[in-house]
């Protein structure tokens, strides 16, 4: 996710961990909180609430009744010290999905995947300064899956897809309990991709696609008033067959105006079997950008992975109530694209050198049909759209499965030895991130990228973040116990990628394994780095520990 944040002395950016020698003179260790966590687990969730602190919540092992477990909710202050704590009983099949943080409140969305008697959607509203947690319930169809979650004027909006029925949106007030339903379409094979709210004009928008076949899909945006009446449907023109919309978000920009943008990929399926729109798009491997993270299993098989692959970004505008044509921007036309891409399959699509008479400027070549036909098949972790200085910013991270080959001797019926080989899944390797800026008409103004080195994991999560200061952008992420950061100015690199090591809790701590590392802006100049680590310290009686950590950092 990208954030707009005023920065000081951008040209000498440095991450500084606070230790006893600088700010907290009364402490002998850096400001770092560690919570014991079983190796390979990921139970802990957190939401930063500005100067009010951080909310940490997770399911405990304590039961609170038949089929119920207690969730622990702890609110810390800005020094990572506990302020207050609550235990909340929830059904054992409840799953945490997404958080939204405002200046005064935190909103948490949970989905009960098995129980539906009293509602299967839970929204918790936490007001840190009042030390209050309130619970609110709604219902989506049984076995439906949540797509997106928004809050506006204390009304929760939850969008969902349903395997056996059409997608939809429910809305319910966290104050009065008043409920609304928003029907998307009566067409079969429709998938909701995103919901957005224009609080000023009081409109709800649903972005969805209809998948007519394996090679044909069509993108739409519905506009509703608050009670749920459909006001208008925007049908975007010049949609190209065989280009599938893998993600899409709509940003309203005043009465009758807006921008829809996301990722697209080519459909290269040659199978003759019947196309299942749900399993081939919204399947158990698909990564939804609303999710805090998504875990892959050790027995993952890439041959069975139907995760949609992408080849570029697209944009389209709504101007004075009229939907315009869709513009496609293939990654192969991005500056230094093949410098960052490491996936061998994608590299095979590298464009041949243009003949002298074919050469054009970078801006012109980005939009050519030749580049738009390149198939890179990148697996992407997509981010929510950001806005900065009138521009729309699209960002995503690319990864690919990685294996190693084991060979062993086998024996036939007569005892003769022969070698056999098999592949072992090692994890997913992050390779790079693509970031691009677009004007209000959907034209790409610039693009850039960031290499993501030596990250291989069986867990996937959004790592990249970006900060904007005037016309410069800092890209940064946390992985392998290091924070990487790079400064760009549009398509120009101002400072190449640099790394700084996270300071441990104890001087002799040696982290040697980590996953789900993140870093994000907290408040003012402060940032929060989190993740799971296995740490060895031979100077302690118990020389190995597995923890979930939270470190407070300054970015100046």
Image: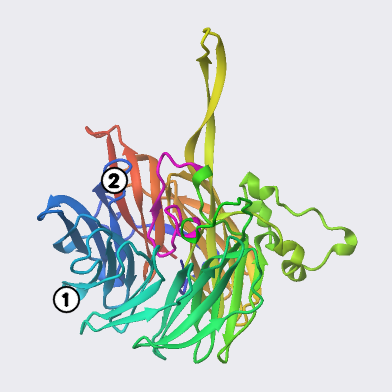
- Per the model, the C-alpha gap separating discs 1 and 2 is 30 Å
Observer-nearest of 479 and 111: 111
x, y percent for residue 483: 46, 53
Task: Report the residue marked by disc 1.
Answer: 130
N-term mark: 1 or 2: 1
Confirm whether residue 509 shows in the render. Answer: no
What is the count of numbered marks?
Answer: 2
Q: Secondary structure at mark 2?
A: strand
Considering only vertical position in the picture, is 19 above or below 414? Answer: below
Main SS, magenta residues: loop
Confirm whether residue 180 shows in the render. Answer: yes
- Is 212 magenta? The answer is no
- Is 284 magenta? The answer is yes
Neighbor class of circle 2 (other Cα within 10 Å; few <14, some 14-19, many 20+) is many
On-image quarter of the C terminus: bottom left
Considering only vertical position in the picture, is 122 above or below 285? Answer: below
Horizontal side of 244 relative to 186 (left or right) equals right
Horizontal side of 51 relative to 293 (left or right) equals left
Q: Secondary structure at mark 1?
A: helix
Observer-nearest of 60 and 69: 69
Query: What kind of colouring is applied to the model shown?
Result: rainbow
The residue located at (39%, 79%) in the rendering is 183
Task: Report the residue marked by disc 2.
Answer: 547
Labels 1 and 2 touching (C-beta < 8 A): no
Instruction: Give residue 524's quadrant in the image.
Output: bottom left
Task: Please provide the residue range marked out in magenta.
Answer: 280-302
**Residue 503: which numbered mark, if any?**
none
Observer-nearest of 279 and 91: 279
x, y percent for residue 76: 22, 63
Instruction: Give residue 179's quadrant in the image.
Output: bottom left
The residue sitting at the top extreme is 414
The residue located at (70%, 58%) in the rendering is 374
């Amino acid at each position: 996710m990208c954030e707009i944040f005023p920065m000081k002395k951008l040209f000498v950016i440095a991450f500084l961990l606070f230790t006893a020698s600088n700010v907290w003179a009364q402490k002998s260790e850096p400001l770092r909180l560690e919570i014991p966590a079983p190796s390979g687990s990921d139970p802990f969730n957190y939401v930063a609430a500005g100067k009010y602190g951080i909310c940490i919540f997770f399911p405990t092992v304590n039961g609170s009744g038949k089929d119920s477990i207690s969730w622990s909710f702890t609110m810390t202050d800005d020094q990572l010290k506990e302020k207050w704590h609550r235990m909340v009983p929830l059904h054992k099949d409840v799953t945490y999905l997404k958080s939204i943080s405002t200046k005064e409140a935190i909103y948490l969305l949970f989905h009960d995947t098995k129980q539906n008697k009293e509602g299967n959607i839970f929204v918790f509203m936490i007001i840190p300064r009042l030390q209050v947690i309130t619970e609110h319930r709604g219902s989506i169809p049984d076995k439906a899956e949540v797509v997106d979650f928004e809050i506006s004027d204390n009304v929760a909006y939850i969008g969902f897809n349903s395997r056996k029925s059409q997608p939809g949106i429910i809305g319910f007030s966290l104050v009065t309990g008043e409920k609304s339903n928003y029907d998307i379409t009566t067409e079969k094979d429709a998938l909701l991709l995103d919901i957005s709210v224009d609080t000023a004009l009081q409109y709800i928008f649903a972005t969805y696609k209809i998948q007519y076949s394996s090679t044909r899909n069509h993108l739409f945006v519905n506009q509703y008033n608050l009670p749920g009446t459909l006001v208008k449907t925007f049908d975007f023109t010049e949609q190209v067959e065989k280009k599938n919309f893998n993600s899409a978000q709509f940003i309203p920009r005043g009465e009758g105006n807006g921008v829809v943008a996301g990722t697209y990929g080519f459909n290269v399926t040659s199978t003759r079997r019947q196309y299942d729109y749900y399993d081939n798009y919204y399947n158990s491997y698909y990564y939804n950008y609303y999710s805090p993270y998504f875990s892959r299993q050790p027995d993952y098989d890439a041959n069975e992975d139907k995760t949609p692959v992408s080849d570029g970004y697209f944009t389209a505008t709504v101007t004075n109530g009229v939907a315009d044509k869709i513009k496609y921007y293939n990654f192969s036309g991005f500056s230094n694209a093949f410098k960052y891409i490491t996936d061998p399959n994608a590299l095979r699509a590298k464009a041949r050198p243009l003949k002298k008479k074919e050469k054009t400027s970078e801006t012109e070549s980005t939009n050519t049909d030749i580049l738009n036909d390149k198939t890179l098949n990148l697996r992407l972790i997509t981010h929510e759209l950001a806005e900065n200085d009138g521009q729309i910013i699209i960002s995503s991270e690319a990864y690919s499965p990685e294996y190693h080959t084991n060979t062993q001797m086998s024996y036939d019926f007569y005892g003769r030895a022969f070698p056999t080989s098999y592949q072992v899944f090692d994890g997913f390797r992050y390779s790079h991130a693509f970031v691009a800026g677009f004007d209000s008409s959907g034209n790409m103004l610039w693009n850039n990228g960031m290499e993501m080195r030596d990250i291989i994991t069986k867990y996937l999560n959004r790592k990249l973040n970006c900060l904007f200061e005037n016309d410069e952008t800092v890209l940064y992420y946390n992985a392998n116990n290091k924070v990487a950061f790079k400064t760009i100015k549009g398509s120009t690199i101002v400072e190449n990628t640099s790394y700084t090591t996270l300071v441990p809790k104890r001087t002799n701590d040696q982290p040697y394994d980590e996953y789900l590392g993140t870093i994000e802006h907290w408040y003012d100049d402060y940032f929060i780095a989190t993740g799971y680590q296995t740490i060895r310290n031979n100077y302690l009686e118990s020389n190995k520990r597995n923890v979930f950590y939270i470190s407070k950092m300054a970015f100046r």
